[in-house]
Structure formats: structure tokens, C-alpha cells
Image: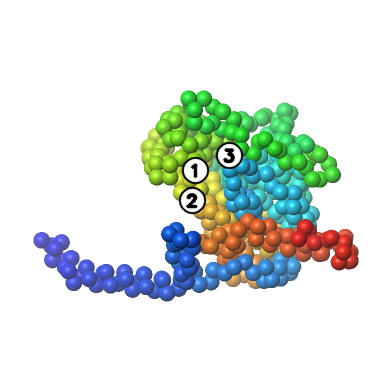
Amino acid sequence: YRYVMNHSLELWAKAFLRDLKKASAYNSNLRFVQVGFSSDVTLVGLRSDFAKVDMESIRKTYEKSKSRLILLDYDGTLIEVRKSGATPPPQLKETLRTLCEDEANIVFIISGRTREKLIRWFGDIENLGLAAEKGCFVRWPKHVLPYINSLPKSTERSRERRMIALQRGTRQSPWIQCSALEFKSGSAVANTTTTSSPSSSSSSRGGGDDKKLNENNSAPATPTAASSSSNNSQWYSLCDSDEKGWKELAMPVIKAYDERTDGAMIEDKEYGIVWKFEGADPDYGQMQAREMQKYLMELIADDVIDIVVYDDNRILEILPKGVNKGLTTSLLIDTLRSNMKDPLFLMAVGDDVSDEKMFSALQNSPVLQRDDSRYDIVTCCVGLKPSQAQYYAHDPEEVRESLRELALVAEQMSPSWTNQSSDSGMVLGR
């Protein structure tokens, strides 16, 4: 009786109108655009200040900065997502190489790919930073290694290093040395002089037997540097080896779901597992992923792993607790900040939901104060869709073109730059 008297029709109507006004006020700050074609057209609401990438403005802030941190996703950002392979084109590698030759630049590729694949593709660019499995492993650019190795070594367990590093604001790197992985003639070779990590493997549906994933392994990248090997082979880990114990519980469950989902595939990495259902029936694959996620969350303790379903990419991803691109971005800024000079240029480019955490970490870093003239932050999303990013690029080709422009600026700013005639072909492949 008391509930009915206190929650009358009039009260409900007022609450409804209040919520309607809130929604109307929110939508008034959005601009709506049509995305798609024919029957697949969707009306998408975008922030009014969400603009197409403005290279003129970005170039100006890039030129006036003394230190730069550039964070790049790989699949869907630097290259198009395709099933046939993801080997980087030579022009992209040359652009990255030119950017990395400027020691004022710290360029990182932050990817869900394994370190074996990243070192195979980019190992010959010694000054390019690589963050594999979304930050579980890091290979630092060669020119910042002296600074990294000068930092105090943490003696805490990996979970404490990940969670406490940002809170205490110390200059201890949360990554610790692990097994090396060398680049030789376009392939990744484990360094047998150190404790080797388990190799990444994949299995595809078929009798429950593990099979090597063929994707991208048939044609290893050919090094474009003069040397066929890299001496920047040391990797640093954000996780401890005992953070793999959950796999013994999870893998039988994942294999069971994989067996009854035609077209699905398992990718077993060093610290994580990805279940890909892009080849499965769309509705059934998504249903299986959600069901598996729920089951694994009940089976394995909350403080051990994170289980995320990415509907757009059609994957289920399992990583050690707290590891994601947002945490990796925050830790990179915290670790490198004292080695960078003001004014500082920070840029992040990505294309999916996991990259939104990278944008958020960059925009809300406790190390970087808002509205501080010493920092210029640029975030860019690939594709016209709702995002926390400042800009959008239509596709990876536009991202590559933007990076080529910055690489040209970097080359012009280098001490060795000399004016060349217009017919010398010095326009980075454009």
C-alpha cells in the first residue's frame, strides 16, 4: 500500500519527462550521420567536436614539440583487416623507420598480436617499440634502453607492479626482463641463452587436436634494413610465469565450445587466449561466446583474468587481470615521462573498442594535467563511429598517409637533411 501511494502515476510521468529532457539535451550535442549502404544504413550520433583528422593542425603541434610519444594499433589501423595475411607493406615499414630515426620520437605499436609475429614483422626497426599481447610484453626502442635499464628494478609480484605503479608515481618500470626473441632474416628466433617462454600456438576446429595457425606464417616479412639481424632482442614482461595456471581450467572449456561451433578457431598465446568466431554463424557464434564468457567467469576467480567479448571483431579474449591497452598506455607514460622534454606531443591511433581504453588513458593520465600548455594530445579513431577520440580517419590508408606526412616532417627536421631537387623522388613513396 505504501509503495503504491508513494509511486503514483503522476510521479512516474514526471520521472519519464525528466529522463526525456536529459536524453534530448544529450542528443542536442550530437550530429547524426548515416553509415552504411542500402538496407544496412544506420543512423549514428557523433559528438559535435568529432572531426576528420586535421594534419595541418597536427603537423604544427608535432613540429613545436621536443619529445613525442606515438602509440599505434596494428590490425585495422596500420593495415586493413584481412584473412589472407597481415604482413606490413614495405612502404609502411619505411615510414615507421623514418619516424623512429628521430630520437625525439618514441613510437610504439600496441597490438594483441604475439611478440613472435611482431618481432618477425618489425624486429629490424630497432628504434620501434613493440607491445605484444596488449602490453604483456614490451620491447623498448633501442635509444631509450639506457634510461630503462637505469631505473630501479621492482621486486614485487606482477599484479602488484601493475596495480601500484600508477598509484605511487615511482619511476620503477613495471616490466621486468624475460626471455629474448631475436630478429634474423625476417624470422623470430628464441634466444636459448635465457629462459625461454612457451611459444604461441593456435588450434582450429577438428577432432580437438591442436594445429598450428597458418595465418600470416606462410610468407615472413623480408627485412628492409641493411643488416639482416637486430641486436635489440631483449623483451620485458608485465606478467609473471605463474599467471598461466588458469589455462589448465579454461582450455578444456574453450575446446568444448570450439568443437560445437563450426568455423571457430582458438589462438593460444603466451599469456592469453583468443577464441575467434568470425567464421561461425553470426548469431550462434555470438551466443556461444557470451555463454562461454559466463561459464568461465564462474569457473575461474575474478582476480585472475579478464574475459571480454568484442562483438565487432567477433572474438572472445582472455588476458591476465588488468592487462589492456589502457593500462599499457598509462604505464608507458608513467615510465617514460621523466625521460621526455616539454613541450610534449602525445598521439594514439586505433580502430576498435580496446583502443578506446588507450584514448581514455591518454586523455585522463594523472601524469598529464588537463589544459596544460606543455602537452598536446592527439587521439584518432579509424572509421566513422562513436568514439572518445578527437579525430577520425576513414581507413588505414588515410592513417598511413598521415604518418608519411609526419615522417617527412621528421626527416626535414633531422640534422642530416639537405635540400634536394624535386625530381629526386624524396617524398616517402607518395
Lower position in the chain sequence, tag 2 or tag 3: 3
Q: Residue at x 48, y 68 (%)?
A: 33
The spot of residue 26 in percent (x, y) is: 41, 71
Q: Residue type at mark 1: give it.
A: Glu
Q: Residue type at mark 3: give it.
A: Cys
The spot of residue 249 in percent (x, y) is: 45, 30
Residue ID for mark 1 = 278
Mark 2, mark 3: which one is toward the viewer? 2
Instruction: Identify the element where label 3 is drawn.
Output: loop
Q: Residue at x 59, y 71 (%)?
A: 371
Q: CA distance from mark 2 to mark 3?
A: 28 Å
Lower position in the chain sequence, tag 2 or tag 1: 1
Instruction: Identify the element where label 1 is drawn.
Output: loop
* Along the viewing direction, whichever of 327 and 199 lies nearer the viewer: 199
Lower position in the chain sequence, tag 3 or tag 1: 3
Q: Residues within 10 Å of mark 1 (few under 14, many from 20)?
A: some
Residue ID for mark 3 = 239
